[in-house]
Image: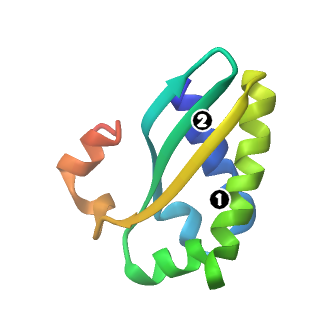
């Protein structure tokens, strides 16, 4: 389930951001708690630079809010449950060049 959630969020990033942003992010589900009626998801979007973090968040948080609403709608459709989605953006400097980080995110280094 975590894999599908990260892929849905990644798809929304691809659809909403241009240039290098979609290729410089990694999405990770930090927590996933499911009850009978609702799923609470806390997810982190990792970027390589501070400037990318600002772009993902957008002015006044508008870009990440749009991203979150789109992702939540698709996740609700996929799971058939109401979703409480928390999205955070963190800078992990040059994560794509770090073997340990690549392994942590599931890439073979």
Q: Residue at x 54, y 38 (%)?
A: 41
Drawn side of residue 91 relative to residue 66, left or right: left
Few, some or many residues within 10 Å of mark 2 (<14, 14–19, 20+): many
Q: Residue at x 81, y 30 (%)?
A: 77
Using the image, tell me which numbered label, if any, was put on residue 23.
none
| Residues at marks 2 and 1, CA–CA distance in whole angstroms | 13 Å
Residue 83 lies, in percent from the top left, at: 68, 36
Number of numbered discs overlaid on the protein picture: 2
| Camera-side residue of 9 and 99 | 9
Colouring chosen for the image of the structure: rainbow
In the rendered image, which quarter is residue 67 located in? bottom right
Side (left or right) of 58 relative to 106: right
**Foreground tag (2 vs 1):** 2
Q: Is residue 87 above or below residue 65?
A: above
- Quadrant for residue 69, please give it: bottom right
Judged from the image, the secondary structure of the residue bearing numbered disc 2 is helix
User: In which quadrant will I find the C terminus?
Assistant: top left
Q: Residue drawn at (70%, 20%), measured in percent from left and top?
A: 37
Q: Residue at x 60, y 40 (%)?
A: 7
Q: Is residue 102 visible?
A: yes
Instruction: Judge from the rendering whether residue 88 lies leftward or rightward of residue 95; answer left or right.
Output: right
Q: Is residue 48 above or below residue 28?
A: below
Any mark on residue 13, and which?
1
Residue 89's spot in the image, x, y percent?
Answer: 45, 64
33 or 44: nearer the eye? 33
Taking the view exactly as shown, the residue that stands out farthest to the left is: 100
Mark 2 or mark 1: whose residue is earlier in sequence: 2
- SS under mark 1: helix
From the image, tell me which residue sits under label 2. Answer: 5
Q: Position of residue 108 (x, y in %)?
A: 29, 37
């Amino acid at each position: 389930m975590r894999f599908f959630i990260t892929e849905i969020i990644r798809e929304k990033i691809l659809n909403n951001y241009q240039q290098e942003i979609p290729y410089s992010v990694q999405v990770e589900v930090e927590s996933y708690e499911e009850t009978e009626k609702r799923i609470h998801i806390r997810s982190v979007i990792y970027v390589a630079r501070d400037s990318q973090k600002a772009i993902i968040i957008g002015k006044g948080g508008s870009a990440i809010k749009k991203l979150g609403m789109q992702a939540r709608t698709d996740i609700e459709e996929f799971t058939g449950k109401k979703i409480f989605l928390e999205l955070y953006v963190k800078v992990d400097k040059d994560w794509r060049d770090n073997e340990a980080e690549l392994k942590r995110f599931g890439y073979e280094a």
